[in-house]
Image: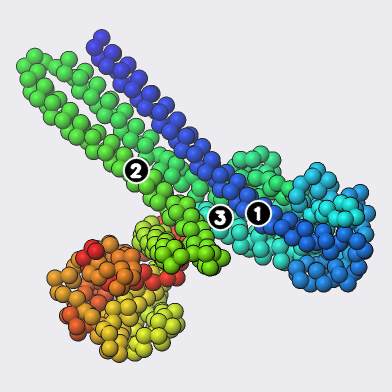
Amino acid sequence: MLLVCAALLVLGLLVAFAIALASNQASSRAAITARVHDRAKIAAALVDTLFASATQQAPTFAKQLGGHVSEALLNGDAATGNATYLAVALPDGRVLAGSSGFTAQARAELPRSGALALISHGDAYAVGNMVPYGRAGVTDLAVPLATASGRRILIDGLSEQLLGLLLTQELNRIPGVAGSENLIVDGSDTVIASSTARVHVGSRFGGAQGAAMLGRFSDSRDGRYYDIEPLTDSTWKLVLSAPSGALFASISGLHRWVPWLLLMAFALVGVVALTLGWRLLHSAERDLARSNAELAAVNLRLASSNAQLERRATELSRSNAELDQFASIASHDLQEPLRKVRTFTQQLAVTEAERLSERGADYLMRANRAAERMQRLIQDLLQFSRVTTKPRAFVAVDLNEAMADVAEDLSIELEESGTELQVGSLPTLSADPTQMRQLLLNLVSNAIKFRRPGTPPQVRVSATVSGERVQLMVADNGIGFEPQYSDRIFKVFERLHGRDEYPGTGIGLALCQKIAARHNGEISAHGEPGVGATFTVTLPLVQQPEDDQASDASDTITEPAEDRNHVSD
């Protein structure tokens, strides 16, 4: 009876754990889809603001187009605004005048565009469908004008190329997982803009993708997840698409089955415990003491194993969540407000320069510098975290070509500082090309930055090959450092000098050390105050293939994280 009660108790606990686990995974999926939809709504609002700015010039056009409208006037305005054509119509749809680009085809396609029908609802502007115009397409932007002669509608024909270029830039800014595709389609399912070369502007959006758009959220048979958000004041829709496997990676594949495997392990432990209990109850009296001792030892090991499994599962879940949150915040949520702070402080310093006091101007300058430092710190931290989380595959990298690219990137710094850069013959090795370029960029820019005043800077880059390993050395004649700091300079945020004397975020050399470690190598430093410093990176010539290498264009590092960091200031 005791065993039956214990079995029922274990079964109940396992069922409750399974229900909670399934609910947690469902909640995680719902949270991911909600986050994708939030991005879609924000992106749709940003696209709307692009066209809302067209209403700002409505009063000017209202004065120009209030009386007789000539073709010459519209031709001039069309040329100024890079419009394919301009036309002026009455609310009933009759066209009063048009520029020379307003052909008979454009006049015939005007009702099909739908812009005039939308503007009749009283909106400040309306954007219609893409309609044929010559060999390409054109989209009508309608803006109502309150003129002295009554209500008129200005129709601005936006070319397919110009509109696609403008909107594609906005689509490329939307964050997403590897393989994400962002589209804008009009009411007739014609692609207006696309962030991927796979879907061309002007093509029809249909097939499995079109079927997926029947609902706001859906998975299609092509293995992708789609989210659609209609744009206000237009017939358009914003479509965000991503591979289902990559989007739901945190609750799919191994991430999905590890908790269930743990549950099975707990069930197995329960079966073992019940079996041992059954054997204890049916064992002979003479073996009772020995069985009790063995059971106690087994229970102790099982408790330790369970605690370790639970701790590791908790740590893994927390680590994955923190990494995802950090990448999301650093790539968009933190940097976007900082960009706005810098933009507005700069604009305020320009527009309000005459009314600002000297102290006020100084405060604005300090605020802008602080925002710039914060933005650089966020970017450097993101680069630091992605060295191992989103690496590229190892390929043959010619360090001579990589060093040539670095010298080109640092050409302005080399010229302004008067630095003499000496580069010896460098080998070819198996490595991540982007990270090798970042390693050289950080070390050379570090040498330029920490130069001695009054001494022409010299930077020497050389390499020696010994067996299956290469030693890459970057030496300078700069300010150097004390030998006791040779290990601490590779720690994150450790600095020897204040940021006002030598600016930086304190991540550059830590990033170099992480890149070297990822390539199964190591980096060391030797310095002497007032003489210079030498950084030596030891790497294998041939790397073993890495499992699950992933390439992500967003990981391309374009700016040096300049810091010879030692002691925190």
Of marks 2 and 1, the one in the foreground: 1
> Which image quadrant is residue 163 in?
bottom right
Q: State the mark number for residue 286.
A: none
Q: Quadrant of the N terminus?
A: top left
Q: Quadrant of the C terminus?
A: bottom left
7, 567: nearer the viewer: 567
Q: State the mark number for residue 49.
A: 1
Q: Earlier in the sequence, mark 2 or mark 1?
A: 1
Q: Earlier in the sequence, mark 3 or mark 1?
A: 1
Whole-number angstrom distance, CA of label 3 to CA of label 1: 15 Å
Q: Secondary structure at mark 3?
A: loop
Q: State the mark number for residue 174.
A: 3
Which residue shows up at 80% across the image and 68% down it? 78
Q: Give the residue type that dot 2 points to.
A: Arg
Residue 489 placement (x, y as % from top left): 23, 68
Query: Is residue 379 visible in the rendered structure shown here?
Result: no
Q: Is residue 530 above or below residue 561?
A: below
Q: Is residue 270 left or right of residue 159?
A: left
Residue 27 placement (x, y as % from top left): 47, 34
Query: Is residue 285 visible in the rendered structure shown here?
Result: yes
Which residue shows up at 37% across the image and 40% down it? 258
Q: Is residue 354 left or right of residue 500?
A: right
Whether label 3 touches label 1, CB < 8 Å: no
